C-alpha cells in the first residue's frame, strides 16, 4: 500500500498521511511527478499504458510518472518511477525540473487532486535495454517532435488527454526552437 502526504489547497503539508485509496476516494490533494526523456535528436520517449490501467488504458503517455510517496521529494519519486516502470537508471544530475502545476482528474470514483512537478531528462536510451513493468506499461517508443506535436494538436490522437503535461512539452519545444 502506498501512502502520500496530504496537502491543503495551497500545496502546504497538513501533517496528515493517507493511503492512495483514501486520497483518491476523498479527493485529497497530494503530490505527483512526471518526466519526459528526450534524446539528442529531440525525440521524446513515450510509454503506452497497460490495458488494465483504470485511467487512460492503451494510450500513449508521458515517459514516466507517478505519485510522490510520503516523505519523498519529487526528484526522488521521478527517479524511482522511471526505474520501476522502465528499468532505466537515471542519475540526479540528468534530471532537470521544468515547472509545477495543479490538476484535477475525475474518472469514475477516482478523484485525483495533484500538485504536479514536471521534469526533463536528457538521455539517449536504446529501447532494447528497457525492461517494462508490464502491469503499468505495454510498450515504449521514441516519437519525433513533429509526430507528438501533430497528435497533441489533433485532439490528443492516441495519447492521454492530460493537457498540462502535453502543453509543457509543447512549450519546451518552442523554447528549443528559439535558442
Image: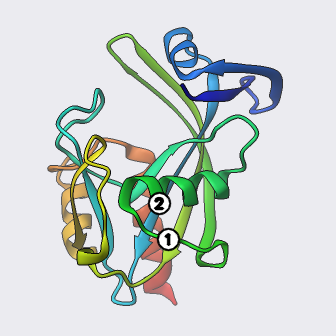
Tell me the crowding category of disc 2: few under 14, some 14 to 19, or many 20 or more residues within 10 angstroms, Cα based.
some
Residue located at (46% from left, 59% from top): 82
Image spot of residue 60 (x, y percent): 23, 52
Indicate which disc residue 83 carries: 2
Residue located at (26% from left, 66% from top): 149
For marks 2 and 1, give the CA distance: 6 Å
The kind of secondary structure element at disc 2 is helix
The kind of secondary structure element at disc 1 is loop
Residue located at (37% from left, 60% from top): 86
| Residue denoted by label 1 | 89
As rendered, which of 169 and 108 lies closer to the eye?
108
Image spot of residue 164 (x, y percent): 45, 47
Residue 160: image quadrant is: top left
Image spot of residue 19 (x, y percent): 60, 19
As rendered, which of 21 and 159 lies closer to the eye?
21
Image spot of residue 94 (x, y percent): 59, 78
Mark 2 near mark 1, Cβ–Cβ under 8 Å?
A: yes
Indicate which disc residue 168 carries: none
Q: Is residue 72 above or below residue 121?
A: above
Specify whether residue 144 is in view.
no
Amino acid at each position: 500500500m502506498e501512502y502520500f502526504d496530504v496537502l491543503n489547497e495551497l500545496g502546504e503539508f497538513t501533517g496528515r498521511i493517507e493511503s492512495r485509496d483514501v486520497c483518491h476516494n476523498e479527493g485529497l490533494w497530494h503530490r505527483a511527478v512526471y518526466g519526459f526523456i528526450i534524446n539528442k535528436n529531440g525525440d521524446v520517449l513515450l510509454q503506452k499504458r497497460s490495458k488494465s490501467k483504470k485511467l487512460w488504458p492503451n494510450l500513449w503517455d508521458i515517459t514516466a510518472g507517478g505519485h510522490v510517496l510520503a516523505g519523498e521529494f519529487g526528484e526522488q519519486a521521478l527517479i524511482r518511477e522511471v526505474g520501476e516502470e522502465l528499468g532505466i537508471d537515471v542519475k540526479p544530475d540528468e534530471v532537470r525540473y521544468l515547472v509545477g502545476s495543479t490538476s484535477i482528474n475525475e474518472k469514475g470514483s477516482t478523484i485525483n487532486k495533484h500538485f504536479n512537478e514536471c521534469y526533463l531528462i536528457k538521455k539517449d536510451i536504446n529501447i532494447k535495454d528497457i525492461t517494462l513493468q508490464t502491469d503499468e506499461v505495454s510498450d515504449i517508443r521514441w516519437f519525433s517532435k513533429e509526430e507528438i506535436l501533430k497528435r497533441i494538436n489533433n485532439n490528443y490522437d492516441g495519447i492521454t488527454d492530460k493537457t498540462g503535461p502535453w502543453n509543457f512539452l509543447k512549450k519546451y519545444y518552442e523554447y528549443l526552437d528559439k535558442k
